[in-house]
Amino acid sequence: MRRRAWTAAVVVSVALIGSTVITQNPAGQNQTAGAAVKSVGRGAPSVHARDFQPLGPNAFGGRGRGAGRGGGGPVVFNGSARDGATPPGIEPLKIDIFTSKDFYKDRALWSDKRYFRCNSGAALEAQWGGNGVEIIGPNGPATAAWGHCDRDMPRSALVSPYAFKTAQAHYEALMAEAKSRGGPTQHTYATVPGEWTGRYARPASQGNDTWFFMQKVQISTVLSLLTPEYQTRAVQEHYHQGNTNVAHWPSQYCWPEGFLRRWHQAAVGEHQIIVTPQLVQIMTGIARNFVTNIYVGRQFNLEGAVPRLGADVPRWYGETIGFWDGDALITWTSNVQGWKTHAAFEHSNKMQSIEIYTPNRDENGRLTGLTHEAILYDPEAFVEPLRIVRNLNKASGPETGDPHTYIECVQTIYPVNGKGTPLSPGATFQYEVLDMFGRPWAKLWERYEKNMEKPVNEDLFDFSKNK
Amino acid sequence: MKTFSTSARTSNRRARQVACGALVVAAAVAVMVPSLRAHHSFSMYDASKTRVFTGVVVRVNPDVNHLQIFFAVMNEERTNVLRDQKGQPIIWAVEMAGSAQSAREGISVNAFPPKTIMSVALHPLRSGEPAGDRGQSPLFKCPVNTPPKPGKHCDSVEGHVVIGTGQLPTPTS
């Protein structure tokens, strides 16, 4: 028995050579460092968004144009220039996203942050007042404001630090680690960490933000994560949010939020977690419901286009399996429906994630929350895997607080002439039925791309050469 | 006063048994049908009419309640698709069971990517709009990039895949 234990220890040691030495709480705030864990696929040190400043441009306070909600005091502008001015020391490009007549032709400029006037994705979508604060300038997009060109998060903070090319390889490596430690841990109702069950505060505040909030990263840096097709899609959205002022945020039409919005501050509120030996459920949402069911101990069917649990039907939020490795819950999500996250980028049906939940504790050992580390794999959309690390800070058990709200979205905004428009009862308009699984937002934007030279897609219908 | 002979009573009993049996079957069907089609009434479709198409898939809409395939109708030569006066492909929609049930049959986003050539029979909308209900008809998928010969359907192409049983029905006039 003792010899077997020693053999296992040696195997583990060899297997973990070259792996990172980390704590279990890389992004935790209110926790003491957990026991050191060696892993090839979780817990690597992360760069925190809280250590960076928002790029802007945006404004707070004041009244009227350039003012913010809840204003009244002096306007505070966060940016480097506005109303047509140029930031000191910055030579603007002759054409940028705010002046271009055809952004498709500008691809060579997309990697230059000046093309976006150093706006963050979140700030660019707010130029016309997308978040209640209009700073576009007196002459429309030509006078759009500039963000801070000297601010950015390093690209390395956005990508996975691990060597895995696929979610499957990542999951299998973490499973191998768990087995080398005698796992995966098999829980009963007597041993499952029931203290996880409860309410977790909305992960939205500064200090608990992530790069995916799109406030602290240059758009050109974000684009460097994407494949050419998905770069084009992202720039198309930025163009219409910043230039033509045609924003299509999915939930404004009661469309689905999409898988990646789970990580966006505006899409999720309080999280409610229920832990059982065979199923862990995480519920959250603001405009739509996000329900993540983690089926502990189950296996994916690997025979289809992507791994899945159920029928060969892409699911809006995928299907998730997982296992316990000690006090860490490790999950794999696949079979996700492609969609978009506005101000960020689109993802494809090939999206998969590896997510690791580890407990954070205070000096008395009391659970204060969970560190949620996610590694995102999408070989169609991303040039390499991405990583988001955040905290879910526990607010209480289920014995207190508001109950979870199941959301039903009732549509009040409609795409009238391709633009989102609130309509009153009795109003009528001509409605074009959209291809909901074929980038419906892009179809609406096409109305505002009349003279652009769009990339030509494959001709689906010509079979004359096949006869 | 009305009287019944023994044979008449026996006949009546049989009739009642048959009626009871029919009721049981009807009840069973009534229970089953809503489970398949609980999302909306299918009375919009004209089940007395059948149309048969060969078309090119442009999108599979994997809705939970009823999967739909949108397809462009092929021309008689099977070289391209029919187009309207503006030159746009004429798109039809065919509605089926829920996406999970359809996937178990072999009909899914992954199994029917855009450009797939397929043949399907459907009961069209009473309104004349280009959509219909597949009903119980089989669906035939041509091999990749292999359209049928002029005027033919995928069931005539070697290597086709059939989903469901039977043959393509004869279209009504």
Image: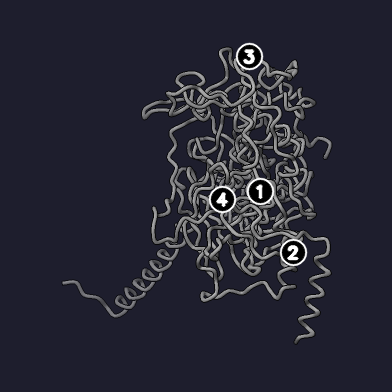
B7 or A55: which is nearer to us? Answer: A55
- Label 3 to label 1: alpha-carbon separation: 35 Å
**Same chain? Circles 3 and 1:** yes
**Same chain? Circles 2 and 3:** yes
* Left or right: B67 as drawn, with respect to A6: left
Q: Which residue is mark 4?
A: B96
A103 or A403: which is nearer to us? Answer: A403
* Left or right: A317 as drawn, with respect to A198: right
Q: Which residue is mark 3?
A: A84
Q: Secondary structure at mark 4?
A: loop
- Label 1 to label 2: alpha-carbon separation: 20 Å
Marks 2,3: beta carbons within 8 A: no
Q: Secondary structure at mark 1?
A: strand
Q: Is residue B147 above or below residue A272?
A: above
- Label 2 to label 3: alpha-carbon separation: 53 Å
Front tag of 1 and 2: 2
Name the residue: 70% across, 38% down.
A153
Name the residue: 72% across, 73% down.
A181
- Structural crowding at the residue carrying mark 4, measured as other residues with C-alpha within 10 Å and reported as few (<14), some (14–19) or many (≥20): many
Q: Chain of mark 2?
A: A
Answer with the quarter of the image where residue A330 lies.
Answer: bottom right
Answer with the quarter of the image where residue A312 lies.
Answer: bottom right
Of the residues shown, which amino acid type is indicated by label 2? Lys
- Label 4 to label 2: alpha-carbon separation: 51 Å
The reply to whether residue B77 is visible in this rendering is: no
Q: Which residue is mark 2?
A: A38
- Structural crowding at the residue carrying mark 3, measured as other residues with C-alpha within 10 Å and reported as few (<14), some (14–19) or many (≥20): some
Answer with the quarter of the image where residue B14 lies.
Answer: bottom left
